[in-house]
Image: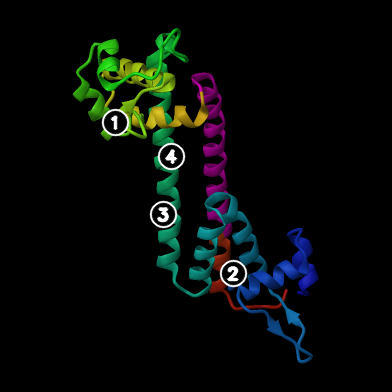
Amino acid sequence: MRPVDLARRHGLSTQAVRNYEAAGIIPPAHRSRTGYRDYTATHAAGLAAYLALVPAFGHSTSRRIMHAVTGGQLDEALEYVDDGHALLARDRNTLRTVEAALSHLGTAAPDTVAGARAPYSVGELARHLELNPATLRTWERAGVLTPRRDPRSRHRQYLAQDVRDAELAHLLRRGGRPLGTIATVLGELRNAGSLEALARTLEGWRRDLTSRGMAQLYAAGQLSTYLDALDRPTRTG
């Protein structure tokens, strides 16, 4: 199989195919007496496997998987695959955690702090929430709150967003949520900017996780095909 034939099969340039060979993603091509590359069905299966792995595991991990498989290190390749599946499972668990917490908050969650003056000191915020100041410090150590510090006094200063986060944390703690869960929720909220934006982010996140899961299923089939091709006698195709 000529380089151009293999490239066209996958919508690539011939240079891309040569680059993948040079990077060790697919085995070295056979060479004709005149020095031209001659790819086989095994190379085609390897290239298909790599292109399927990328959306499932990312470029870096996909390269490691292909290097291990092509180099005959099957257990190492499978460990990378296992790690990718474990990461997807952790991401799904985080998504469920945040969704469950938001569902618990419901309409009681303050998206903004109406009339809140800022900044609050730790004592003032504790009185506002009817909590002990030590509780707020504990929440900070757990990553639930992230107050700024006054440059001169180094005292904590809780701005409007910090007050909102503290009120959300208070609601979630009353609902029995552990601090680790609350820290995850508020971290995602700070990244999104608002509860409404976070809800939209979670919808997109769920779609992305579904796509990754489907991509991993497809990639497994392509990788299995490549492994079968490596076990068969190489034939020019």
Whether pointer 4 and pointer 1 mark residues with C-beta atoms closer than 8 Å, the reply is: no
Dominant secondary-structure state across the stretch colored magenta: helix
Look at the numbered disc 3 and give the secondary structure of its residue. Answer: helix
Look at the numbered disc 4 and give the secondary structure of its residue. Answer: helix
Q: Is residue 112 left or right of residue 26?
A: left
Residue 109 quadrant? top left
Is any atom of residue 86 visible in this view? yes
Residue underneath mark 3: 82
Give whichever of discs 3 and 1 has the lower sequence position.
3
Look at the numbered disc 2 and give the secondary structure of its residue. Answer: loop
Of residues 89 and 111, the one drawn nearer to the viewer in this rendering = 111
Q: How many marks?
A: 4
Give whichever of discs 4 and 1 has the lower sequence position.
4
Residue 206 shown in magenta: yes
Q: Position of residue 119 (x, y in %)?
A: 38, 20
Whether pointer 2 and pointer 1 mark residues with C-beta atoms closer than 8 Å, the reply is: no
Label 4 packing within 10 angstroms: few (<14), some (14-19), many (20+): some
- Say above or below: 92 vs 79: above
Residue range in magenta is 194-222
Residue 157 shown in magenta: no
Residue underneath mark 1: 140
Label 2 packing within 10 angstroms: few (<14), some (14-19), many (20+): many
Look at the numbered disc 1 and give the secondary structure of its residue. Answer: helix
Whether pointer 2 and pointer 3 mark residues with C-beta atoms closer than 8 Å, the reply is: no
- Say above or below: 182 vs 74: above
Q: Is residue 186 left or right of residue 69?
A: left
Q: Position of residue 78 (x, y in %)?
A: 43, 61
Label 1 packing within 10 angstroms: few (<14), some (14-19), many (20+): some
Label of residue 91 in the image: 4
Is any atom of residue 175 visible in this view? no
> Where, quadrant-wise, is the C terminus in this rendering?
bottom right
Residue visible at 49% across and 20% down in the picture: 195
